[in-house]
Image: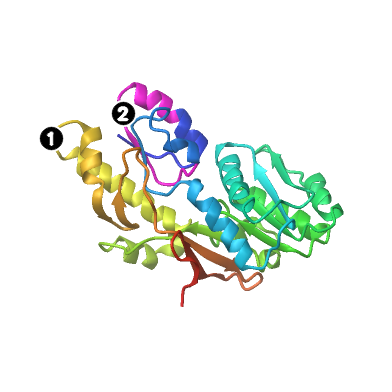
Amino acid sequence: AVVGAACSGASMGANAILSAAGIPMISYASTNPGLSDASAYPLFYRVVPSDAIQGPAGADMMTDAGVGNESLAILHMTNDYGSGLANSVKDAWDINGALCAAGMQGYEESVTDFSAMVTAIIDEEGCEAVYLSSYITDAAMILEELDTQGFEGKIFAGDGPAGPGLYEALTDHALAEGMTVSAPRAGSTYGDFEARYDANAADVGSIKTYVLTAYDATMVIGKAATMSGEIDANIKTTGSGYEGASGIIDFLDNGDIGGNGYDICSYGGADETYTCGKYWTAVGKVQSSA
């Protein structure tokens, strides 16, 4: 069995080869909604929720922050992760109303010049907020371009650029001030791995959630490998009420998990703080962490 991949496109490509050989995989970070199709992606599991859930979380996050109807633009990578999350956010936002005139703009993962996209947002009256379906590097470049062109609105993103690692990609840390992101929320942790991570977080880095889920994916496979019988059946058995570092893992029939909602976190800017003061669940919507 295989731990990974991280990005959704890599998981999709790897699954085509691995499943043909009868090898299951457990991703610790792939969130594209398409991966929920067990017929298209057999023997695939993940210990993070689908972006079909993160879309409504993102829409509610922005509504809670005061973003109004027809004032939101979306910039997104055109890879499997970027498009999947952006479409999920747009579908959820459409319940509130339309996007602003700049609409939804896609770009290849390799793009480094965002001036035209930002200009389109600046030039269109009423575009007062931007949602980034991106990774860390491109999010940093977009933040820099928004600052260069004088954008004064609100900036949001999903889990791709989430975490204090964004500061490392910015030449001016102050540019992150006020940016708000959603990231998968860990459930009640079991065992001592989270405490061991916390004691070494500065050295390990990365988004804490994905450190915990990577550990859980590894441990589920390890425990399944010690059992007799087929590894795929053993993964299903092990992943039923499994008490992981990232919370309880209960694999659905298609290899998905329901998740624990999303943390809503904001950047302090020059002081390099990253604070998760709210969270979202499907039942309770946006709530205070206090």
Residue at horizontal 42 percent and vertical 33 percent from the top: 37
Q: Is residue 273 left or right of residue 44?
A: right
Mark linked to residue 132 = none
Residue 223: quadrant of the picture: top left
Give the labeled residue for mark 1.
228
Tell which circle, 2 or 1, labels the residue nearer the N-terminal end: 2
Question: In the image, is residue 59 above or below residue 76?
Answer: below
Instruction: Determine the secondary structure under disc 1.
Output: loop
Residue at horizontal 65 percent and vertical 69 percent from the top: 269
Instruction: Determine the secondary structure under disc 2.
Output: loop
Question: In the image, is residue 254 above or below residue 140?
Answer: above
Residue at horizontal 48 percent and vertical 51 percent from the top: 53
Position in image of residue 216 (x %, y %) = 31, 50
**Quadrant of the frame with the N terminus:** top left
The amino acid at mark 2 is Ile
Residue 58: quadrant of the picture: bottom right
Q: Is residue 159 visible?
A: no
The amino acid at mark 1 is Ser
Q: Is residue 255 visible?
A: yes
Magenta range: 14-32
Residue at horizontal 75 percent and vertical 64 percent from the top: 153
Mark linked to residue 23 = 2
Q: Are discs 2 and 1 less than 8 Å apart at CB?
A: no
Residue 48 magenta: no
Position in image of residue 281 (x %, y %) = 45, 61
Position in image of residue 126 (x %, y %) = 81, 58
